[in-house]
Image (cartoon, coloured by chain):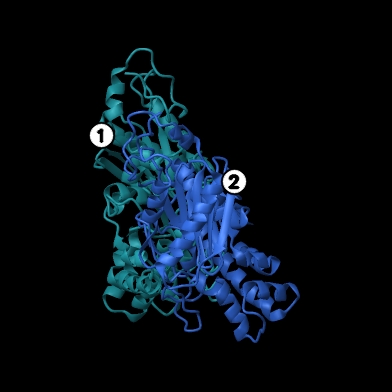
Chain colours: A blue, B cyan
Amino acid sequence: MPAPAGPEAGDGRDAAPILPVVEDVARVLAPALAIDVGGSKLAAGIVDGEGRLLVSRRVPTPVTADPAAVWAALETLVGAVRAEYGRPVAGAGVGCGGPMSWPAGEVSPLNLPAWRDFPLRAAVRDLLRAGRTSSRAPSGPVRLHNDAVCVAVGEHWRGAGRGRRDVLGMVVSTGVGGGLVLGDRLIDGASGNAGHIGHVLVQPADQPDSPLCGCGARGCLEAVARGPAVVGWAQRQGWVGEPTGVALAASAAGGNPVARAAFARAGRALGLGIASAVNLCDVSVVAIGGGLVGAGAPLLEPLAAAYAERARLPFSRRAQVVPARLGADAGLVGAAALVLCADRYWTVD
Amino acid sequence: MPAPAGPEAGDGRDAAPILPVVEDVARVLAPALAIDVGGSKLAAGIVDGEGRLLVSRRVPTPVTADPAAVWAALETLVGAVRAEYGRPVAGAGVGCGGPMSWPAGEVSPLNLPAWRDFPLRAAVRDLLRAGRTSSRAPSGPVRLHNDAVCVAVGEHWRGAGRGRRDVLGMVVSTGVGGGLVLGDRLIDGASGNAGHIGHVLVQPADQPDSPLCGCGARGCLEAVARGPAVVGWAQRQGWVGEPTGVALAASAAGGNPVARAAFARAGRALGLGIASAVNLCDVSVVAIGGGLVGAGAPLLEPLAAAYAERARLPFSRRAQVVPARLGADAGLVGAAALVLCADRYWTVD
């Protein structure tokens, strides 16, 4: 069976073999390798055509300034996953923190200072080629996107947005990111950056007490609702405790008024920002994931109230704003979908 | 030549004729009828495959509570345009003020109180059928969208967004509306309402001095930047003059400080709202049309300043925010594109 032609043909893999290669038959139907690169952990897995995570492993991201050391840890992780799975894969999908050049895949993740313009897509491509069982077998496409975009894709494919055509997927964690699937297709934007909901306006842009965002502007959702900003705000109001979102959430659950106020402020900002996005994009589902959502009601109730206050158009009132369903696996599932469901989630090559 | 099958087959037209009908050959290559329904004017025209407006006419919208009287005026206008053109058309595209059920096309335009749940798409379909030269000739598809969406489509197809894949088109007039073309396709949203940039947040949502929007929320762009709101604000600051955007623009051009402040306030709100949209959707061009843009620098300079303040991500800094190019014809050109370029601008039927 020859390698399929078409959109994949320019993906840098070997020319189609003259004679059928047995491995190919498997590859066409094979699961994909999925990789998720974050500032605190590296994850890899094998995802099948139904979105099931067959194998997965994760390790802490090495704390180092050496780009090769980070890559070596990822290579080892991927090797272990592939050895555990033991069969060929259809290709690889990669999610990584931004910014990045897209689709070239040179990454400079804010939370991973060791990598600046690191050629991650090319490196994974070389890794897959090296792992072939025959030098004539194609190694399959390697595709990469922002990690929050991968979470949104995962939630659209197999999570809270399953079966819906128009979905906003979000991650509220160290940053506030997201991805848009509209008309059943992933929206890339002109430079691969669509989905940056963390930079919609939620506070007055012209007041010095509006927190300054990492992007340089005042008033951004991310500046208010990212985990470290929520914890920092609580500390400035006198809250003492281990400076993590988990500890602050426990404190809020225990009734601490400052911790509750901190989550209420973040939840309100999220509700305002989400309402702007829904009014603009007419999605029917917003799936919110990321560690901060673990705070539960102290975050989600003020979020819902602010959303109701600002989403007054009939269509935006009807939209469902719900927790993401796939949890920590969403990024891997979505990364795999870039390869396994390219008709919906991949537009370039 | 049989009628083309496929996406149009369910469009309610007659079954394909057994024998070729000469009219069909022309229809396949024919220009489209375009209709634009607004609260102050009705427009109709004939647009060819290159986006040229071959014929066009407009009349004031009748001031009446009688839905049939408004329809009669539109029917007369369309009849005059078709008589002047004198040849078959490929179908009809219609732009109309919202809200509406979409794609069913029952319209309740805010600025046209005579029509509430008026079945405009069905009425135009009947009109096209009645105008056939043979009862066996298909009458072609009839498609309808929000008027601001049609303007955005027109600007993407033949205006300031030509050749770009990711464009936000806007109309700043009695309201503030828009449409999104992302990845070279019109984004409809879950209910046909994508593009409502008038309802992104630009002022604090929780302050009573933030103007109340027609949607019921506080802080919306439309509540600040729609023409009547700009004029009303100037009046409350003591400006006296004919209460129209044109008169206020002339006053601002003449140096009146209150008129200038009114446009500066609206321009700032537009810049803030556009920055949120570009950060979220990663468009490379924003094309702004509508009567208020005629105010020129007093509106556009504060707009550019506020945009620069809030659009700090590298991709949003690079986006071009420019005046629309097609002027009053954009709505007709875009409505025709729903029929003539269905691959990009029409997803349902």
Residue at horizontal 53 percent and vertical 53 percent from the top? A80
Q: Does dot 2 land on a helix, a strand or a loop?
A: strand
Residue A162 picture location, percent across and down: 58, 45
User: Crowding near pointer 1: few (<14 within 10 Å), some, many (20+)?
Assistant: some
Residue B83 visible within the image: yes
Q: Are marks 1 and 2 on the same chain?
A: no
Residue at horizontal 30 percent and vertical 40 percent from the top? B45
Image position of B255 with respect to B197: above or below: below
Q: Nearer the viewer, residue A329 or A19?
A: A19
Residue at horizontal 59 percent and vertical 72 percent from the top? A266
Q: Amino acid at mark 2?
A: Leu
Can you tell which of label 1 and label 2 is closer to the viewer?
A: 2
Q: Does dot 1 land on a helix, a strand or a loop?
A: helix
Residue A20 picture location, percent across and down: 39, 29
Q: Chain of mark 2?
A: A
Q: Amino acid at mark 1?
A: Glu
Residues tagged 1 and 2 counted as in contact (Cβ below 8 A) = no
Residue A336 picture location, percent across and down: 50, 48
Q: Nearer the viewer, residue A128 or A12?
A: A128
* Count of residue discs: 2
Q: Chain of mark 1?
A: B
Left/right of residue B252 with respect to residue B5 in the rendered view: left
Which disc number belongs to residue A337? none
Left/right of residue A266 with respect to residue B337 in the rendered view: right
Q: Would you identify the image quadrant in which residue A264 lies?
A: bottom right
Q: Nearer the viewer, residue B238 or A227?
A: A227
Quick one: quadrant of the N terminus of chain B? top left
Quickly name the residue at label 2: A54
Q: Nearer the viewer, residue B152 or B255?
A: B152
Left/right of residue B186 with respect to residue B47 in the rendered view: right
Q: Would you identify the image quadrant in which residue B209 lies?
A: bottom right
